[in-house]
Image (tube, rainbow, N blue to C red):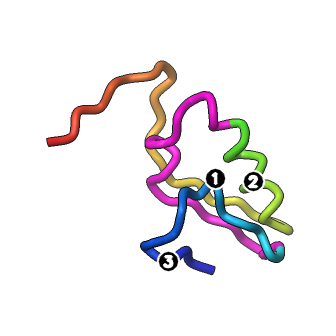
Amino acid sequence: MLLPKASLSALDFELSSRYQQSMLLGELIDINTNELPKMYKRLYQSSKRCLLLPDSYQPTPVEVYYW
């Protein structure tokens, strides 16, 4: 299931069922580090079997400047 573009944050998504595979692409880097445990829990709860998290990883927070 894909979220519509006009939807709220992935953190606010209401889970209606569990899926064989849950995937979050390119989103984790933009989530506040204090909210990451909540996001990981939501992903875990959404999946019956597999999680796919192709994303960037930075062990320490870095400020990103958007043009």
Residue 4, numbered label: 3
Mark 2 residue crowding within 10 angstroms, few (<14) / some (14–19) / many (20+): some
Residue at 78% x, 47% y: name it. Answer: 41
* On screen, residue 9 above or below 36: below
Range of residues picked out in magenta: 18-36
- Measured Cα–Cα span from mark 3 to mark 1: 14 Å
Residues at circles 3 and 1 in contact by the CB criterion of under 8 Å: no
Q: Is residue 24 magenta?
A: yes
Mark 1, residue position: 11
Residue at 85% x, 68% y: name it. Answer: 48
The answer to which of 51 and 40 lies nearer the viewer is 40
The type of residue carrying mark 1 is Leu
Left or right of residue 50, residue 1 in this image: left
* On screen, residue 22 above or below 33: below
Mark 3 lies on a secondary structure that is loop
Mark 1 lies on a secondary structure that is helix
Residues at circles 1 and 2 in contact by the CB criterion of under 8 Å: yes
Mark 2, residue position: 42
The answer to which of 38 and 26 lies nearer the viewer is 38
Residue 46, image x and y in percent?
Answer: 78, 64
The type of residue carrying mark 2 is Arg
Quadrant of the rendered image containing residue 50: bottom right
Left or right of residue 9, residue 22 in this image: right
- Measured Cα–Cα span from mark 1 to mark 2: 8 Å
Along the polypeptide, which appears first: circle 1 or circle 2?
1
Mark 1 residue crowding within 10 angstroms, few (<14) / some (14–19) / many (20+): some
